[in-house]
Image (spheres, rainbow, N blue to C red):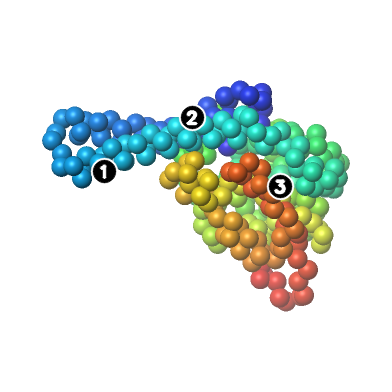
Amino acid sequence: MPSANRQSGSYRGAWQIFVYNWHFYAAALVVDFSAAFLLRGFAQPPGIRIALYFIATLATFWALSSLLVSHYVYDRSPLLGWRWLQGILGSDVGSWANIHAGLDQSSDALRSLFPSEHTRILDIYTPSEMSEPSIQRARERSRPTWATEKAIPSALPLQDGECDTIFLIFVAHELRKRDARLQFFCEINRALKPDGRLVLVEHLFDWSNLLAYGPGALHFFSRRQWRTVCGEAEFHPVTEVGITPFVRCFVFAKRTVPPGENSCG
């Protein structure tokens, strides 16, 4: 996801989406040229011609719509200002940790919005679990946060009950395997205080994102998937807010579980 260090109304967010995911746009261009070559160079039955026009139109539409929506979400909307978080959480979130995968777009803003004597910033990038080329490109172009600690998703360097709040902002979907996500959320549960909160910000696999990003939306998870994995990790939902039609913020609270009944083991 784009960096938060951008001026409102610029095109930096859309440009970063293009750079990080250029292979998708290259594929769309190949589809368009291939369809044009087949249509102009060879006689095609009417059904094949209609199919080629449809495929080329769809590839062009998704390439353009993804950039336009990204410009709206990351350059024009209030999303990366992060002040909307205060409206959801209040001005005091206690001790907190922010977990990212090498593209830290929010820690500076969180420090300003929620000053605390105890903050932790963790980088959980794991090549074996996060194989998308876009995340590697983003890491190569991002400026590391000086206070970031390297971490393993399945064994976070946080003490039991250390944090009041843990932020997961556009990072949890990078863990593609369901078991790895569940283990990660169980670790977050362990690191939260009994009344601690988990703040999850993600694009969803839903109709709005599918229309905007086409096949790229397959990289997201559905609302049901997030609520299910959080429930299995012993969280219960507190609130859910749409930040633009394409991004949602979930707040979960740690559930009180009788000894021996914790599904995280």
Mark 2 secondary-structure assignment: helix
Q: Quadrant of the C terminus?
A: bottom right
Work out whether mark 1 precedes mark 2 in sequence or the reverse, and give the earlier one: 2
Q: Which residue is mark 2?
A: 19
- Tell me the distance, in whole angstroms, between the alpha carbons under discs 1 and 3: 45 Å
* Residue 206 drawn above or below residue 18: below
* Three-letter code, disc 3: Phe
Instruction: Check disc 2: other Cα within 10 Å, few if <14, some if 14-19, many if 20+.
Output: some
Q: Which residue is mark 3?
A: 167
Work out whether mark 2 precedes mark 3 in sequence or the reverse, and give the earlier one: 2
Work out whether mark 1 precedes mark 3 in sequence or the reverse, and give the earlier one: 1
Q: Nearer the viewer, residue 230 or 33?
A: 33
Instruction: Check disc 3: other Cα within 10 Å, few if <14, some if 14-19, many if 20+.
Output: many
Mark 3 secondary-structure assignment: strand
Position of residue 134 measured from the top left corner of the image (x, y, whole percent): 49, 38
* Three-letter code, disc 1: Ala
Q: Which residue is mark 1?
A: 51
Instruction: Check disc 1: other Cα within 10 Å, few if <14, some if 14-19, many if 20+.
Output: few
Please give left or right for residue 60 compared with residue 150 in the image: left
